[in-house]
Image (tube, helix red, strand yellow):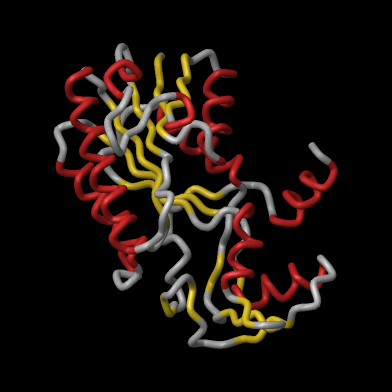
Amino acid sequence: MKIVVIGGTGLIGSKLVAKLGEQGHEAVAASPNTGVNALTGEGLADALTGASVVVDVSNSPSWEDNAVMEFFQTSTRNLLAAEAAAGVGHHVALSIVGTERLPENGYFRAKIAQEKLIEESSIPFSLVHATQFFEFVPGIADSATDGTTVRIAPVLFQPIAGDEVAEAVGRVAVGSPLNARLEIAGPEQGRMDEFFRKVLADAGDPREVVTDPHAQYFGSELDERSLVPDDGAQLGKLTYADWLGRNKSGK
């Protein structure tokens, strides 16, 4: 099966292309680095020729509100039009758990707009909503840092390993279209402030994690369940401690 992965040279995309290739599929990494640009349409028609499935794991180069909205709407429209012309039978998109709970967040608004275009198109689809990746934990801490203090809200948090995100997206890609949303998350759910307090302490990071109910997450104030899935989510098996151990050992 030919599966085109838009954003196929990025964090999740590169893992997905490798996993699909190991399963015997013709996995094509499509990104500006390989001459395929969903935002401009460059190279799309050629890349999608003969494709059965398109998986979109691309990301906007800018998180500025207008730029990210333009990226997801324009690239998705271009993709869906090219897929219709090529006879693609399944569109898979990776999104974020909780997009609809933080409508004041410009990035989440753009993802909602992207999903609306996909749901309203004529192409069968599957939406995979993932929680935060383990790989993003340092960046989340840095974004919440003010001097030597890291302000984190005491809300629920359930991150997942990037490898398990790629595995879940791959399973969906080779299956029948869901025409619905699937949520995926890590195996452990806990308080976000407690998670970061332990992670930083274990790493010997001198920053102090301060519990702040009004601490913002990339510009948004969080509620108890803003970042975690509802009942019925598929859960990964790899804990953060196990993932960290694997990465330190190079496995």
Q: Position of residue 73 (x, y in %)?
A: 24, 47
Apparent side of residue 92 relative to residue 163 in the rendered image (left or right): left
Query: Residue, x 26% and y 32% (percent of image)?
Result: 79
Q: Quadrant of residue 31?
A: top left
* Relative height, residue 158 to residue 52 (above, below): below
* Relative height, residue 145 to residue 91 (above, below): below
Apparent side of residue 203 relative to residue 146 in the rendered image (left or right): right
Q: Quadrant of residue 138?
A: bottom right
* Relative height, residue 83 to residue 213 (above, below): above
Q: Nearer the viewer, residue 225 or 221?
A: 221
Apparent side of residue 104 relative to residue 196 in the rendered image (left or right): left
**Does the rendering let one see residue 99?**
no
* Relative height, residue 42 to residue 135 (above, below): above
Q: Position of residue 37 (x, y in %)?
A: 35, 32
Query: Residue, x 40% and y 24% (percent of image)?
Result: 4
Query: Residue, x 50% and y 38% (percent of image)?
Result: 168
Q: Nearer the viewer, residue 43 or 140?
A: 43
